Image (cartoon, rainbow, N blue to C red):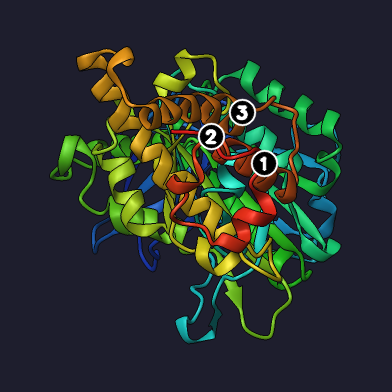
Amino acid sequence: MSAASKEYIGVASIRGPLLVVEGTTDIGYDEMVEIIGPDGGRRIGRVLSVSRKAATVEVFEGTSGLTIRSTGVRFFGRPLTVPVSLEMLGRVFDGLGRPIDGGPEPLARERRDINGSPINPTARAYPSEFIQTGISAIDGMNTLVRGQKLPIFSGSGLPHNVLAAQIASQAKIARREEFCIVFAAMGIVRDVATYFQLRFEESGALENSVLFLNLAEDPSTERIATPRMALTVAEYLAFEAGKHVLVIMTDMTNYCEALREVSSAREEVPARRGFPGYMYSDLASIYERCGRIRGMKGSITQMPILTMPNDDITHPVPDLTGYITEGQIVLSRELHLKNIYPPIDVLPSLSRLMKDGIGEGRTRADHPDIASQLYASFARVREVRSLASVIGEEELSAVDKSYLRFGEEFETGFVAQEAVEDRNIDTTLDIGWNVASILPKTELFRVTEQEIRQHYRVPERGV
């Protein structure tokens, strides 16, 4: 046992992913731990709790094959760290930050605590710069702003992985400033991991990205470290290297289920649906690690992706996420069944910072008004469709029939686009005006007369 570390042979108990080590002294919460198995294999863990008599250790790589008497535990006296350097760009790592792309360990000037440091609220700069994803339903209706956290709420079987890869390969900011992607995947199957790597390579985005991939076959508790690894690297790239970083994390539901597994092993009193009562603060410790700092060039923007069990938006994971983040993008199973990609349902979707990132000087002067008009008109479409299902389409008024045509074109022409189609903001807004022009001018009450004269595409229809 060296002065810098403490080593113990034998543990008191093994429960799921947890070890209990008795007789420990001077052990700290969240301290990094190395576990040595009977075969000499080494695993990484962290201290979950300490008392006068024992320390509870969470083993990220699982406890399979460990025995009570012969397991060695070494406490390092410091938290779990990850190397940070510009050499990590273009590389692929596992969920614990080890290279899996066949390349060497990146040369790093330093290693940093994966738990990061909170940003002083008084030092934060308000998000106000537009990020173009190339996807009309996001750029036009639920705009992403630099420094924002905007999650994607999906469901099992919906194409959120395709959407995540498309955003990662297309996202860009104005003025050609340095922009990069940090991508963290948790609990994904191997073929999806391969898809992400190939998509990043084919689009050329890999050379300006860092990928952390935790597979479904990997121990679930490893997923607790993966997003923190990714965010620590993102903080270095943003606030040390001066880059604008987009962090995409999928799937946060798998992360929360790993939290539930650890909580169950600790025999904690469960909260809603068995999840731990501290899940809100735990998620906040991840989501709040983004933003802009006054006087610093870089920024961190987050797009966490989560699947809603049974498409239930009131499930604890999307529910708590919605309280912490600044809006949400909701994917629709109904649109997916219509073969519409991306199946973004614009009505429950929301970007609370959209108003600060659009308009003249950022996107286009007519952007706020046409976005509001499209939203209001599509809300009317839902009402007309309900009415048509009761009285029949032939009994609708001419105006209501125009709303049905608008709704169809909005879904198939504005929302729908190819998975490799990258639309700039001008194209998105022009398509929006083409769709809005299906309606009579008298129905366009959210835009100005000047905007109608400039952008309305077809002659006014008789009604």
- The C terminus is located in which quarter? top left
Query: As drawn, is 421 to the left or to the right of 14?
Result: right
- The image's mark for residue 413 is 3
| Res 25 quadrant in image | bottom left
Give percent across and percent down for residue 193: 65, 25
Distance between the Cα atoms at labels 3 and 1? 15 Å
Q: Could you tell which of marks 3 and 1 lies nearer the N-terminus?
A: 3
Q: Which residue is mark 1?
A: 457
- The N terminus is located in which quarter? bottom right
At label 1, which amino acid type do we have? Answer: Arg
Q: Is residue 395 above or below residue 204?
A: above
Nearer mark to the viewer, of 3 and 1: 1
At label 2, which amino acid type do we have? Answer: Arg
Nearer mark to the viewer, of 2 and 3: 2
From the viewer's side, name the closer residue of 345 and 40. Answer: 345
Nearer mark to the viewer, of 2 and 1: 2
* CB within 8 Å, label 2 to label 1: no
Q: How many marks?
A: 3
Report crowding for label 3: few under 14, some 14 to 19, many 20 or more residues within 10 A (C-alpha): some
| Res 70 quadrant in image | top left
